[in-house]
Amino acid sequence: MRSARGKRVFRLIRRLVSIGVPLLLVVQLTRVGWSEIYRSLPSHPGFYLILLIIFAALPVSETLIYRHAFGLRLLTGLPIFFKKRVYNNDVLNYSGEVYLYLWAERMLSLPNRQIIGSIKDNNIISAVASTSFTVCLVGILIMTDSILLPDAIANASLIQGLSVLAVIAILLAVVVKFRHAIFHVPVKSLVLFFGVHGTRMIVVSVLQVIQWSLVLPNTSLSILLTLLTVQIVANRIPVLPVKDLVFLGVSVQLTVMLDLSSAAVAGMLLTSIVLSRLMNLAILFLVGVHEFRTTRTTMGLASLSAEEELDTSPVDSEFGTR
């Protein structure tokens, strides 16, 4: 991976996956039937309301976190973190963090060390919280037979599950032990970051199951939890591009095993993907207009301030000019 050839190969693989997944998905959906998918699109208004809440969950939670870290007002931070979400999801991983740093450096009167330290610490805590949540949730669901899995996974022993939890506990202990060398913000802030991220993931997971149950009303909870598990695991694969499309493709394949309507599942997930992309596009436009107006207003105020300072400067006694 460090060699030039390795980097080229890795980029080629990512591009092939980015192109191959949508093509494979088109083939899968064609087999299901586009007209059947169209007839199966969600009609329950609650589906779309929950979609909006899930879409806004991350920006709202990060606004609360950086309100504590940067002293941001809620209305000031929301547009920034909605745009940050778009960059991370649809442009490049962590490009949203770069955007946030450049915005904070330009707009906030804070030391660079504090800005970089807060962003870094929040990313580390977010990764720890999401990984811990994923492993614990999947482990609990497997041990309680709450999801439908192949026999090779379903027969995983209790010792194996406890071993994974032990590894997480050791990693958390290491983080706590060397927190002063790793983190910039104080422990109270780290606990707040972890609590906000953990609460968000629990709320979003519950809402996700409720949203799917509105479209698939006669589906058992174990099947819905199986879909949720697949989604969570797919989202935690760091180098996987187009994760939502991968989840859609895998879910369509799983419908046979789960005894679900392929058209209903495809219509439900495809609607979420398309609407999310449209909302991302709308956010880029609206926040861009907002930032342009804010920048122009700031420049105008700065220009007026400079003119006032010039007008109140002392008169030059020799030339009679200011």
Image (spheres, rainbow, N blue to C red):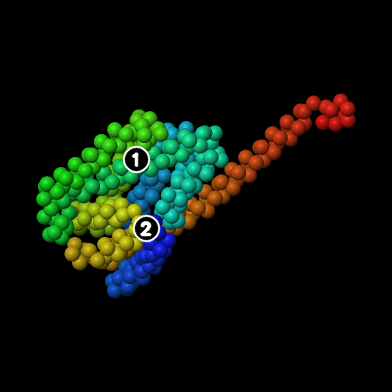
Position in image of residue 134 (x %, y %):
26, 48
Residue 274 in which image quadrant:
bottom left
Q: Amino acid at mark 1?
A: Ile
**First-in-chain label (2 vs 1):** 2
Closer to the camera in the image, 20 or 225: 20
Q: Residue at x 86, y 25 (%)?
A: 317
List the residue tagged with mark 1: 125
Position in image of residue 244 (x %, y %):
34, 58
All told, the count of numbered labels is: 2
Q: Residue at x 13, y 55 (%)?
A: 154
Closer to the camera in the image, 22 or 160: 160
Question: Mark 2 falls on what kind of element?
Answer: loop
The image shows residue 146, relative to residue 15, as above or below, that is: above
Q: Amino acid at mark 2?
A: Met
Position in image of residue 234 (x %, y %):
29, 56
Q: CB atoms at circles 2 and 1 under 8 Å apart?
A: no
List the residue tagged with mark 2: 1
Question: Mark 1 falls on what kind of element?
Answer: helix
Q: Residue at x 59, y 43 (%)?
A: 294
